[in-house]
Image (spheres, rainbow, N blue to C red):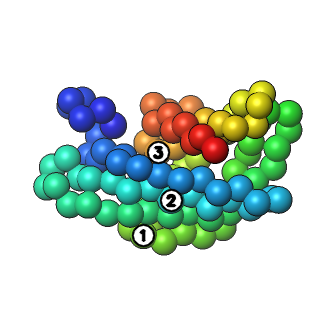
C-alpha cells in the first residue's frame, strides 16, 4: 500500500517476475508499516497467455506463505513490461498494481 495510506499493513519494497514457457516465479520484499519488520514472499505456478492477457494458477510458494491472489496480467505491445494485480481479497477487490519491466 501507499506509505501514507491509513489502510494496509505492508509496503512492497521490490519484486521480480520470471516467466518461462508456461511457468512463473514471483518474488517480493515487504516492510510491515506497523512494526518495521522486513519479510519476503514468493509464489510459483503456471500461466496462460491469450493475446496480451496473462492468467495465473498458483502451485506453490514460500516466504511468509501469503498467496498473492493474482488477478490477470497484461503484457505490453513490445513485450518488455508486465502489469499485474495482487493482494487484498483477490481479483475484483482493491488490489495492488505491480509493473515489472525487462
User: In the rendered structure, which disc, 3 or 1, sits on the residue that comes first in sequence?
Assistant: 1
Which mark is nearer the camera, 2 or 3?
Answer: 2
Instruction: Answer few, some or many: residues within 10 Å of disc 2's Cα (few below 14, many 20 plus, some between 14 and 19).
Output: some
Q: Residues within 10 Å of mark 3 (few under 14, many from 20)?
A: some
What label does residue 27 carry, if any? Answer: 2
**Element type where label 1 sits in the image:** strand
Dot 3: element: loop
Residue 81's place in the image compared with 34, above or below, is: above
Quadrant of image for the C terminus: top right
Q: Which residue appears at 62% of the width and 61% of the height? A: 25
Q: CA distance from mark 2 to mark 1?
A: 9 Å
The residue pinned by badge 1 equals 63
Determine the residue positioned at 42% across, 70% down. 63
Q: Which residue is at 45% across, 31% downward? A: 94
Q: Which numbered mark, 3 or 1, is in the foreground of this view?
A: 1
The image shows residue 48 at horizontal and vertical percentages of 81, 49
Q: Is residue 81 left or right of residue 85?
A: right
Tell me which label, 2 or 3, sits earlier in the chain.
2
Instruction: Determine whether the residue tagged by mark 2 lies in a helix, strand or loop.
Output: strand
Residue 85 visible at all: no
Tell which circle, 2 or 1, labels the residue nearer the N-terminal end: 2
Q: Position of residue 90 (x, y in %)?
A: 53, 43
Residue farthest along the left direction in this orientation:
35
Label number found at residue 87: 3
Q: 89 or 58, which is in the foreground?
A: 58
Q: Is residue 5 visible?
A: yes
Q: Are marks 2 and 1 in contact (CB under 8 Å)?
A: yes
User: Distance of mark 3 from mark 1, alpha carbons?
Assistant: 15 Å
Residue 99, horizontal then vertical, whole percent: 55, 37
Amino acid at each position: 500500500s501507499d506509505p501514507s495510506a491509513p489502510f494496509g499493513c505492508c509496503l512492497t519494497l521490490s519484486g521480480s517476475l520470471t516467466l518461462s514457457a508456461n511457468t512463473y516465479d514471483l518474488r517480493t520484499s515487504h516492510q510491515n508499516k506497523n512494526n518495521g519488520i522486513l519479510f519476503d514472499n514468493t509464489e510459483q505456478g503456471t500461466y496462460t497467455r491469450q493475446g496480451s492477457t496473462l492468467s495465473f494458477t498458483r502451485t506453490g510458494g514460500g516466504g511468509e506463505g501469503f498467496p498473492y491472489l493474482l488477478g490477470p496480467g497484461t503484457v505490453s505491445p513490445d513485450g518488455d513490461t508486465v502489469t499485474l494485480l495482487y493482494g487484498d481479497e483477490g481479483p475484483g477487490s482493491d488490489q495492488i498494481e505491480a509493473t515489472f519491466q525487462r
